[in-house]
Image (tube, grey):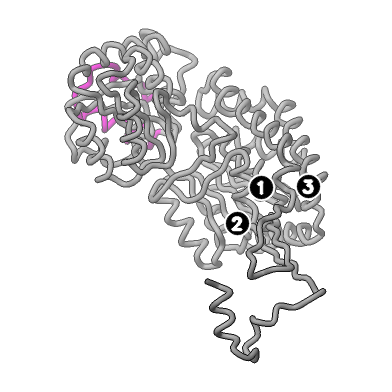
Amino acid sequence: MDLSSNLHKNEYTTLIDKQKTFFDTHQTKSLAYRRDALIKLGDAIRKYEQHIIQALKSDLNKSEFEAYSTEIGIVLKEIRFVLKHLHTWARPQKVKTPLTHWGSKSTIYSEPYGVVLIIAPWNFPFQLAIAPLIGAIAAGNCAIIKPSELTPKTSEVLAALIQETYDEEYITVVQGDVGTSQALLNEKTDYIFFTGSISVGKVIMEAAAKHLTPVTLELGGKSPCIVHKDANLKLAARRIAWGKFMNAGQTCVAPDYIYVHQSVKAAFIIHLKDAIQELYGANPLDNESYTRIVSDKHFTRLEAMLHEGTVIAGGHSNRDTLRIEPTILTDITANAAIMQEEIFGPLLPVLEYDTIAYVLEEIRNRPKPLALYIFSENKEIQQQVLTQASFGGGCVNDTVYHFTSPYLPFGGVGSSGIGNYHGKGSFDLFSHRKSILKQTTLFDIPFRYPHLKNGLKRIKMFLK
């Protein structure tokens, strides 16, 4: 069955019913079944590696290096990590029992939700479809993946890979546009995992509320980067340029704007210019490995932002190739669009500050970001930023790297998202923790019953 955007509502219903029926056979709950499914996924990814790389090149002009390091390699690493630890995570967890429950044993069972709907974005169209799928499989769920229509070649390869590897009653891909996503959201699934914009996240949550479906939202926001006066400026510039301009800035955890201490601003900007040239050459628009903007619509939005400040590096663009140079902007006003919405492109506003207290106040006055980065050698400054600013996650003296660790649950807070995944976080996310108390029948505890003489007095004494 070739699932595409012209599926009718009854076919979506049929597909979900088919997956629910299969889930009810309990096959997916078997640890052996889950491990086998993950091994098959890894084998399929390796088999399709060149197809994935070619598709990412076609959709976003990603280089082979970037395609493997940020899309393919990261999910293969995740699969290996999950396979290594899954038997421990899936084991029922024994916990302590209070004295008031004497004679009983307490256990937490991790059980799958059922049919999971994964709606993936276009910026990392392979990785951000497969990474949550790994968690869904590990927890024992069935899954439907809806990839982005803005990266059609990658969606086609993803669909072929999944179709060849699994029966559709277990895992499948449904391709289509926004109407397809809406049609799937109108159906009742058991869990929804969405990665994308804040505005669409609100739509997802509203749709989930109609069925009281649990939901994870991996959103975004304006992730700040702070460069303090004692930072290693050259290293900070290289790591910020790498984190910001990979994928042409189309990364949810990319540094969105920089606050640099006024005493080192000029020196830092020199290092930042050098880092951009080191990574992308003197003419990034001619660099065949430089990623393009996903669509003409997004290109137009970003090009308009180029005029909202003073361009001190970059600033050139090519509509024919949908490329915009890595660009540094200064003299940005607080009410400029570039400071009001997530940039999601290769434009980097640089602001200055005098005190950390001022920066923290500015950050607190904005919606809570998905990431935050602080460059400083001062542990007190580091700790002040980490404890006084609320954000999803981040790095000290680096950018983006926290996203790649399977030991660090990844997710947002407030408007930047709900829920965390990666590693054990993914297993826990797609599992309901079912609490069970097993009580002895060898004796009974009498004081809990209301007819006991002086029962209230005894229970008060016991519970003190």
Q: Using the image, determine if residue 350 lies above or below residue 163.
A: above
Say whether residue 149 is visible.
no
Magenta-tinted stretch: 296-319
Dot 2 crowding, Cα within 10 Å, few <14, some 14–19, many 20+ = many
CB within 8 Å, label 2 to label 3: no
Q: Residue at x 66, y 57 (%)?
A: 96
In what element is the residue under mark 1?
Answer: helix
Query: Which one is in front, 437 or 84?
Result: 437
Separation (CA) of disc 1 from disc 2? 10 Å
Q: Which residue is mark 1?
A: 136
Q: Earlier in the sequence, mark 1 or mark 2?
A: 1
* Left or right: residue 247 compared with residue 259: right
Q: Residue at x 70, y 66 (%)?
A: 437
Q: Using the image, determine if residue 105 lies above or below residue 130.
A: below
Separation (CA) of disc 2 from disc 3? 20 Å
Label 1 sits on what residue type?
A: Ala
Q: Which residue is mark 2?
A: 191
Say whether residue 191 is visible.
yes
Label 2 sits on what residue type?
A: Tyr
Dot 1 crowding, Cα within 10 Å, few <14, some 14–19, many 20+ = many
Q: Earlier in the sequence, mark 2 or mark 3?
A: 3
CB within 8 Å, label 1 to label 2: yes
Q: Using the image, determine if residue 172 lies above or below residue 280.
A: below
Separation (CA) of disc 1 from disc 3? 16 Å
Query: Which one is in front, 327 or 414?
Result: 414
Please provide percent x and percent y for residue 171: 72, 47
Q: Which residue is mark 3?
A: 167
